[in-house]
Image (spheres, rainbow, N blue to C red):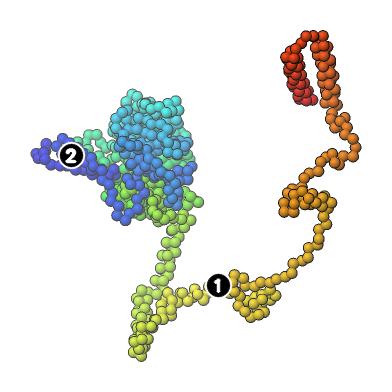
C-alpha cells in the first residue's frame, strides 16, 4: 500500500518508444518521437522488420506507423504505401510471408492480421483478437493455414482462407490443445517452422518453455523445459527475473534437419535466444539442451537470425551492437552428458545503430553475403559479412555493391603498415622539420634583398618543395600527349594560302567553276499543239493543264457494240425492246375504239400511260441488277 497517493510513477518501454505514467487511478501512455540531429532516418517511426524479398529482388521495410516501403540493394526507394487510414490509430508489430512468396502479412496492436499483395492492396483482414485489442508478435503460414501468437497461451489458427476470400475470418483452435493437457503455461511470444518434411513447429513462451508440434496432425510431440522458470518461486522473484527466462526468437537449422542421419542425429538443430543475452542450441529429436553461451553481456534480451546455408549466426542487443558467429561446425555432435559452454568463433562485432536492434536478415548477391539490420532509431543499414557498412537506406547518395569494402580496408591497412615499417614516425617528423627549416632559412635569406614592390608581386615556388607539387608535376609529365592541329598546305582550293590574305567571314576558302552547257530539248508534237491551243484560247500569260484528248478522235474503225458489251447485256436489251414495242401496240388498240373523249380525258390517259412506262422501267432496272449479281 502506498502512503503518498500524490506520487507519479513512470516507466519507459525502449523497444516501442512509449512512456507510461500513472497518477492515482489513471494510467496514461505517451509516445516519444526521436529527435533528428544530423542523423539519417529511413522512416519516421521505429522499424519493425526489414527483409530481403528474393522474388522482388528488393528490401522490404515496415515501421510501427504501418508504412511499407521497398528499396533496391543500392539504396533507391521504388515504392511506398501505408496500411493506416484516416482515423485509425494502432501500431504495426510484426511481418510475415506466405509459403509461396506471393503475399505478405502484417500484424497490429488492434488484434488484426492484414493480408497484402505486393502492389499495396489489402486482400483480406483476419480478426485474431475477436474484437479486442491484442498485440500480435509473430505470424507464420503453414499449408493453407495462418498461425498467430503473442497474447495467449494457445496457438491461433485461421483455416480455409480461400473459402472466405474478401470476408472476415474467425480463428479456430489448434487441435493439439483441445484437451488442455498439453501446451504452454504462459503466453506464447515466438515460433519457428521447418521447411523440410517432416514439418515441425516450435513455440516459445515467456517462461522459457519450448513445445514441439506436428503441423500435419497438429498434435503435441515434445517439450523442452530445461531452462524453464520454476512455478514455485514467490511472486517477488517472478517479477524480478521474469525477463531472464523469456524466449524472444526461435530458429530451425533446416540444413541439418534435411541431412539428419544416425551419425549426426544427436547434433543441434534448433536455436533459441532471449533473456540476459543467452543463445541455446537444442536437439528436437531427443529434447536435449546441447550447448548455451552468453552472446551479449549486460543486456536484458537479444534477437538473432541465421543465413540460408546455416553457416552464420547474427545476434543483436538493445544497445545497437551486432555480432556475427560461425556455427557451421558448432554442435554437430553431442556425446557428453553436460551442457556445453564453449563459444563459437566470432567473425565480426560492430555497432551499426544507436538504439536496440529489431531485425537481422542475411542476403546473398553475386556469391557474396550481406547483412541487413534494422533498429528502433528509425534506420536500416546494409553491411557486408565483416561489418563494413555500405550505407543507410534513406541517405541522399546511393552506394555500389561491386566494391569489396573488406579488401579496400585490408589494402589501406597494409599500406599503412608498410609505411610504418620503412620509416618510423619519429624519423619522418624529423625529416619534415629539417626540410621546413631549410626552406624557411632560404626564404629569409632571399627576403633581405627583395624590395617592397617585388614582395607584393612575388609568388612562392611550392612545386618542388611540397609533395603535392611533385605529384602534380609527375602527372603532367607522364600524361599522354595530344596531337596538336597543323596547317594544311597541299590543297589547291585554299585561296588564302596562295594570296597570303587571312580568311574572313564564315568561310575560310572558296572556289568557282563554270556550269556545264545544257543541250536543247526537242519538243514533241503533242506539246506543240497544246502550247498553240493555250496561246490561241487562253493567252500567253495564263498557264493551265493541257486538256485530255477524246477517245473518238483516235478511233479508225466503226463502233461495234458486240465487241464491247457481253452477250447477256445485249440479249437483255433486245428483250426489253420487244416488250416495249408490244406494250405500245396493245395500248394503241385499247385507245383507238374509244370515242367522244374530251381533251381532259386524253391528258389523263396520257398520264396513266406515262406512269405505266415509268413502273416498267423501274422493274426492268431492278431485274437487270439482280441478273448482274447472279452472274
Which residue is at the front of the view, 312 or 431?
A: 431
Where disc 1 sits, the SS reads: loop
Pick whichever of labels 2 and 1 is earlier in the sequence. 2
Which residue is at the front of the view, 504 or 389?
A: 504
The numbered dot on residue 22 is 2
Question: What residue sits 19% from the left and 43% below the top?
Answer: 10
Q: Are marks 2 and 1 in contact (CB under 8 Å)?
A: no
Residue 564 location in percent, x, y?
85, 32
Asked if residue 39 lies left or right of residue 367, the reply is left
Residue 193 location in percent, x, y?
41, 36
Say which of marks 2 and 1 sits in front.
Answer: 1
Residue 560 location in percent, x, y?
88, 32
In the displayed structure, 321 sits above or below 251; it is below
**Residue that mark 1 sits on:** 480
Q: Is residue 304 visible?
A: no
Within the image, what quadrant is residue 104 found in?
top left
Q: Is residue 422 visible?
A: yes
In the displayed structure, 163 sits above or below 455; it is above
Asked if residue 338 lies left or right of residue 18, the reply is right
In the displayed structure, 114 sits above or below 431; it is above
Most extreme residue toward the bottom, as rendered? 449
Question: What residue sits 59% from the left and 74% below the top?
Answer: 504
Question: What residue sits 22% from the left and 41% below the top?
Answer: 20
Where disc 2 sits, the SS reads: strand
Check the picture and name the quadrant holding the N terminus.
Answer: top left
Amino acid at each position: 500500500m502506498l502512503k503518498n497517493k500524490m506520487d507519479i510513477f513512470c516507466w519507459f518501454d525502449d523497444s516501442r518508444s512509449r512512456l507510461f505514467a500513472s497518477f492515482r487511478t489513471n494510467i496514461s501512455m505517451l509516445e516519444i518521437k526521436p529527435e533528428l540531429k544530423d542523423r539519417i532516418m529511413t522512416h519516421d517511426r521505429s522499424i519493425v522488420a526489414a527483409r530481403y524479398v528474393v522474388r522482388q529482388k528488393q528490401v522490404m521495410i515496415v515501421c510501427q506507423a504501418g508504412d511499407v516501403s521497398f528499396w533496391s540493394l543500392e539504396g533507391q526507394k521504388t515504392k511506398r504505401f501505408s496500411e493506416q487510414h484516416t482515423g485509425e490509430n494502432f501500431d504495426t508489430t510484426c511481418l510475415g510471408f506466405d509459403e509461396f512468396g506471393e503475399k505478405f502479412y502484417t500484424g497490429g496492436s488492434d488484434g488484426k492480421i492484414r493480408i497484402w499483395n505486393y502492389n499495396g492492396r489489402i486482400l483480406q483482414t483476419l480478426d485474431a483478437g475477436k474484437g479486442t485489442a491484442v498485440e500480435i508478435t509473430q505470424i507464420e503460414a503453414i499449408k493453407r493455414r495462418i498461425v498467430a501468437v503473442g497474447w495467449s497461451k494457445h496457438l491461433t489458427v485461421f483455416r480455409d482462407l480461400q473459402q472466405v476470400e474478401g470476408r472476415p475470418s474467425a480463428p479456430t483452435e489448434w487441435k493439439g490443445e483441445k484437451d488442455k493437457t498439453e501446451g504452454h503455461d504462459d503466453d506464447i511470444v515466438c515460433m519457428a517452422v521447418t521447411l523440410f518434411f517432416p514439418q515441425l513447429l516450435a513455440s516459445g513462451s515467456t517462461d522459457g518453455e519450448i513445445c514441439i508440434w506436428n503441423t500435419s496432425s497438429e498434435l503435441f510431440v515434445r517439450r523442452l523445459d530445461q531452462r524453464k522458470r520454476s512455478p514455485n518461486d514467490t511472486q517477488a522473484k517472478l517479477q524480478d527475473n521474469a525477463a531472464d527466462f523469456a524466449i524472444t526468437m526461435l530458429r530451425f537449422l533446416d540444413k541439418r534437419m534435411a541431412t539428419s542421419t544416425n551419425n549426426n542425429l544427436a547434433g543441434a538443430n534448433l536455436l533459441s535466444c532471449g533473456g540476459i543475452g543467452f543463445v541455446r542450441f537444442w536437439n528436437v529429436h531427443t529434447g536435449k539442451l546441447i550447448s548455451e553461451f552468453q552472446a551479449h553481456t549486460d543486456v536484458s534480451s537479444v534477437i538473432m537470425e541465421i543465413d540460408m546455408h546455416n553457416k552464420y549466426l547474427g545476434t543483436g542487443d538493445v544497445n545497437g551492437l551486432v555480432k556475427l558467429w560461425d556455427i557451421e561446425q558448432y554442435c554437430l555432435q553431442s556425446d557428453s552428458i553436460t551442457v556445453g559452454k564453449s563459444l563459437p568463433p566470432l567473425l565480426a562485432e560492430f555497432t551499426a545503430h544507436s538504439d536496440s536492434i529489431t531485425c537481422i536478415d542475411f542476403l546473398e548477391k553475386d556469391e557474396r553475403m550481406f547483412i541487413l539490420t534494422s533498429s528502433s532509431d528509425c534506420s536500416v543499414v546494409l553491411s557486408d559479412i565483416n561489418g563494413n557498412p555500405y550505407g543507410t537506406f534513406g541517405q541522399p547518395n546511393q552506394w555500389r555493391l561491386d566494391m569489396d569494402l573488406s579488401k579496400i580496408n585490408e589494402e589501406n591497412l597494409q599500406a599503412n603498415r608498410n609505411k610504418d615499417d620503412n620509416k618510423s614516425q619519429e624519423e619522418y617528423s624529423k625529416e619534415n622539420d629539417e626540410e621546413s627549416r631549410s626552406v624557411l632559412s632560404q626564404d629569409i635569406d632571399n627576403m633581405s634583398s627583395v624590395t617592397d614592390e617585388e614582395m607584393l608581386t612575388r609568388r612562392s615556388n611550392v612545386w618542388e618543395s611540397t609533395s603535392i607539387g611533385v605529384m602534380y608535376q609527375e602527372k603532367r609529365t607522364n600524361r599522354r600527349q595530344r596531337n596538336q592541329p597543323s596547317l594544311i598546305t597541299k590543297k589547291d582550293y585554299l585561296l588564302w594560302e596562295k594570296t597570303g590574305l587571312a580568311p574572313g567571314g564564315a568561310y575560310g576558302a572558296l572556289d568557282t567553276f563554270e556550269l556545264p552547257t545544257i543541250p536543247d530539248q526537242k519538243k514533241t508534237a503533242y506539246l506543240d499543239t497544246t502550247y498553240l491551243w493555250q496561246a490561241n484560247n487562253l493567252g500567253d500569260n495564263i498557264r493551265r493543264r493541257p486538256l485530255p484528248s477524246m477517245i473518238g478522235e483516235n478511233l479508225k474503225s466503226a463502233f461495234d457494240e458486240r465487241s464491247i458489251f457481253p452477250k447477256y447485256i445485249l440479249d437483255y436489251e433486245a428483250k426489253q425492246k420487244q416488250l416495249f414495242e408490244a406494250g405500245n401496240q396493245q395500248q394503241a388498240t385499247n385507245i383507238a375504239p374509244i370515242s367522244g373523249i374530251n381533251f381532259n380525258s386524253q391528258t389523263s390517259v396520257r398520264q396513266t400511260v406515262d406512269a405505266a412506262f415509268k413502273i416498267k422501267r423501274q422493274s426492268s432496272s431492278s431485274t437487270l441488277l439482280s441478273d448482274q449479281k447472279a452472274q
